[in-house]
């Protein structure tokens, strides 16, 4: 067995095909250069051990990086992941929550359906995370190899070299003035919950009763869905406004007077709309009153009277909470 | 301590490697002749580092290569290109400047020790 041939083969099989022949020829003649005349196998072994592990030698011939994502892209890669992953989770949860509500037919109790959906959602979130991780890593690995050469990146760095002047653009946001990401995400979920509750009130908002032991059953809706849905264009406008407000809060990241004003206008008009809709006498499902009178063993007029009071309390606390929120945001915006 | 010193020494050497190789390529050399020349000058270089380095320099257009098939076995000869000569001279100036700077630094250090 010719050790030199085997060694050369061991190196070149790890190299790109078009460079193989040239490197093989050079390597072979180099090894032969290292040997004395009339050499024995010991001399060959000696020469080869000087060249070292063929895998290592082949690796130093290769130009392509020996890593998936190198130091030039690593920062951007991690930053992208941090930005994308929370949104991927949030969107997955929203979509599947929406989906399970749409596909809900009322045959199953809402709580057990919710628990089932919860399991499915967790599975889906894990699935989406794996997908996101996989595809972003692939894209960055490709960029590492073809998209951005080192010189491109260095050139880019030169264009926006950091100077102390850049510090003037940095705004230090006092903690008390800041709008946290948690607030933004909570706001987003809050809108989603309200929107879903509005459009699917006939399946969601109503009387639940435990029949035959422990399974909760949806008995009847609180509201006339037709009356409720007759307001849909206004609701859609409010959803758009609220989402816009949240995006604005997210980018502004702190309370400003402009933001406080916008927030107050949207909140107050949504409160007015809420009261207008809630005051519609057609809104309440008329079957509710006799049903509840039956359950609580009282008269229909007593039920109607307590419902009136419940509605007044809800409306009042709604208004109060909005006023508190406006007042707090105003105080935060005033902090210098 | 020993392995740490080794790491630093290797780093120091690696920085000077390109300069050492470029300096010997003013005349055409093939792989093994280059190894011997460097070794004679006391510069020890892993062969598994040198051959890939030559290819890289060729790709960066600092050296050009040609196969000589007249001898008993074919040999690939490398020699500095015009661009390579230019880079070599600049790198040499850098090296001289750097050694002067370090020299003055290290001398200062010796004075402190001798005080």
Image (tube, rainbow, N blue to C red):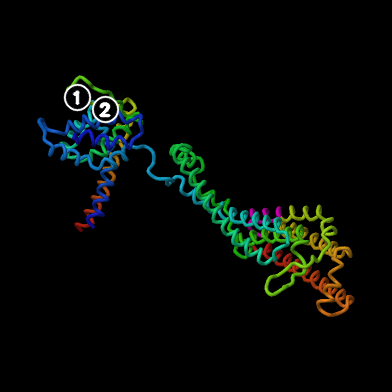
| Mark carried by residue B78 | 2
User: Could you tell me which chain the residue with mark 1 belongs to?
Assistant: B
Q: Judge left or right: residue A18 versus residue B110.
A: right
Q: For the view shown, which residue lies furthest in the bottom direction?
A: A297
Q: Which is nearer the eye, A206 or A132? A: A206
Reply above or below: A53 against A249.
above
Q: Position of residue B31 (x, y in %)?
A: 23, 31
Q: Position of residue A236 (x, y in %)?
A: 77, 53
Q: Which is nearer the eye, A159 or A144? A: A144
User: Could you tell me which chain the residue with mark 2 belongs to?
Assistant: B
Q: Judge left or right: residue B78 versus residue A261.
A: left
Reply above or below: B46 against A179.
above
Classify 10 Å Cα crowding around label 2: few (below 14), some (14-19), many (20 and above): many
Classify 10 Å Cα crowding around label 1: few (below 14), some (14-19), many (20 and above): few
Assess whether residue A245 is covered by the magenta stretch: yes
Q: Which is nearer the eye, A72 or A130? A: A130
Q: Judge left or right: residue B66 versus residue A105.
A: left
Which residue is located at x 21 percent, y 31 percent?
A30
Q: Tell me which segment is drawn in magenta.
A: A243-254
Q: Position of residue A12 (x, y in %)?
A: 30, 34
Quadrant the N terminus of chain A occupies? top left
Which secondary structure dominates the residues rendered in magenta? helix
- Of the image marks 2 and 1, the number of the one nearer the N terminus: 1
> Dot 1: what SS?
loop
Reply above or below: B25 against A317.
above
Assess whether residue A20 is covered by the magenta stretch: no
Q: Is residue B92 visible?
A: no
Q: Label 1 belongs to which residue?
A: B73
Q: Quadrant of residue A309?
A: bottom right
Q: For the view shown, which residue lies furthest in the top direction?
A: B70
């Amino acid at each position: 067995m010719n050790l030199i041939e085997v060694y050369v083969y061991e190196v070149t099989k790890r190299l790109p095909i078009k460079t193989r022949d040239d490197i093989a020829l050079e390597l072979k003649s180099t090894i032969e250069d290292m040997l004395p005349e009339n050499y024995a196998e010991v001399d060959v072994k000696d020469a080869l051990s000087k060249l070292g592990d063929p895998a290592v030698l082949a690796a130093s011939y290769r130009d392509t990086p020996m890593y998936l994502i190198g130091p030039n892209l690593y920062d951007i890669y991690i930053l992208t992941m941090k930005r994308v992953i929370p949104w991927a989770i949030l969107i997955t949860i929203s979509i599947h929550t929406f989906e399970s509500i749409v596909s809900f037919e009322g045959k199953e109790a809402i709580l057990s359906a919710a628990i089932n959906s919860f399991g499915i959602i967790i599975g889906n979130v894990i699935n989406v995370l794996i997908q996101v991780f996989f595809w972003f890593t692939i894209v960055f690995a490709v960029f590492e190899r073809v998209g951005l050469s080192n010189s491109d990146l260095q050139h880019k760095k030169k264009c926006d070299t950091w100077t102390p002047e850049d510090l003037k653009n940095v705004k230090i946001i006092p903690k008390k003035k800041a709008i946290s990401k948690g607030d933004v995400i909570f706001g987003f979920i809050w809108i989603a919950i309200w929107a879903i509750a509005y459009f699917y009130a006939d399946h969601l908002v109503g009387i639940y009763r435990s029949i035959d032991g422990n399974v909760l059953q949806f008995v009847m809706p609180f509201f006339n869905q037709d009356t409720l849905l007759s307001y849909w264009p206004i609701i859609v406008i409010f959803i758009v406004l609220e989402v816009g407000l949240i995006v604005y809060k997210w980018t502004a990241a702190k309370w400003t007077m402009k933001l406080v004003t916008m927030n107050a206008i949207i909140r107050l008009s949504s409160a007015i709309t809420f009261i207008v809709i809630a005051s519609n006498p057609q809104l309440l499902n008329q079957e509710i009153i006799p049903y509840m009178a039956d359950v609580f063993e009282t008269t229909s007029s007593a039920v109607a009277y307590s419902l009136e009071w419940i509605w007044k309390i809800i409306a009042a606390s709604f208004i109060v909470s909005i006023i508190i929120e406006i007042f707090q945001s105003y105080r935060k915006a005033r902090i210098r | 301590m020993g392995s740490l010193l080794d790491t630093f020494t290797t780093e120091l050497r690696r920085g000077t490697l390109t300069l050492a190789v470029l300096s010997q390529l003013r005349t055409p050399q093939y792989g093994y002749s280059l190894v011997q020349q460097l070794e004679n000058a006391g510069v020890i270089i892993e062969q598994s580092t040198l051959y890939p380095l030559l290819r890289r320099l060729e790709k960066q257009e600092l050296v050009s290569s040609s196969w000589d098939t007249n001898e008993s076995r074919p040999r690939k000869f490398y020699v500095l290109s015009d661009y390579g000569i230019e880079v070599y001279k600049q790198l040499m100036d850098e090296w001289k400047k750097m050694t002067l700077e370090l020299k003055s630094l290290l001398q200062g250090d010796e004075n402190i020790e001798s005080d």
